Amino acid sequence: MFYIGSTNNLERRIAEHNSNRSRYTKNKGPFELSYKEEYNTNSEAKKREYYLKSLKSKKVIEKLINGPIV
């Protein structure tokens, strides 16, 4: 299972998820970071988050995480 989200404090957000303080991920962890992208604005980050969520494809997300196969 993959979780896609955005935050301005990654370490805090992962800790929240793993301590069941996040309503949407409660009792679904533990979580570990597999991939991250950084953006200059919250707007850019949210656009990317919504795009990735719209894919609804485990294979596409895995390819993104693992990078291109050479």
Image: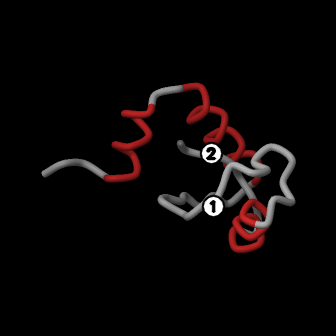
Q: Residue furthest bottom?
A: 11
Q: CA distance from mark 1 to mark 2?
A: 14 Å
Residue 33 image offset from top left, x and y in percent: 54, 63
Of residues 59 and 52, the one nearer the viewer is 59
Q: Position of residue 41 (x, y in %)?
A: 73, 55
Q: Residues within 10 Å of mark 2 (few under 14, many from 20)?
A: few
Frontmost of labels 1 and 2 is 1
Identity of the residue drawn at 49% across and 58% down: 35
Q: Residues within 10 Å of mark 1 (few under 14, many from 20)?
A: few
Question: Residue at point 81% right, 59% down?
Answer: 20
Locate residue 53: give its quadrant.
top right
Q: Is residue 57 left or right of residue 9?
A: left
Secondary structure of the residue carrying numbered label 2: loop
* Amino acid at pointer 1: Pro
38 or 33: nearer the eye?
Answer: 33
Q: Please give left or right for residue 35 compared with residue 16 in the image.
A: left
Q: In the displayed structure, would residue 27 be above or below residue 50?
A: below
The front one of 65 and 40 is: 65
Answer with left or right where residue 37 lies relative to residue 57. right
Q: Give the mark nearest the N terminus, 1 or 2.
A: 2
Q: Nearer the viewer, residue 29 or 33?
A: 29
> Which residue is at 59% across, 32% downward?
51
Q: How many marks?
A: 2
Q: Which residue is mark 1?
A: 30
Q: Secondary structure at mark 1?
A: loop
The location of residue 11, given as percent across then percent down, is 70, 74
Q: Residue at x 79, y 50 (%)?
A: 26
- Residue 58 tag number: none
Residue at the limit of the structure toward the front, as seen here: 27
User: What's the amino acid at mark 2?
Assistant: Ile
Residue 4: numbered disc = 2
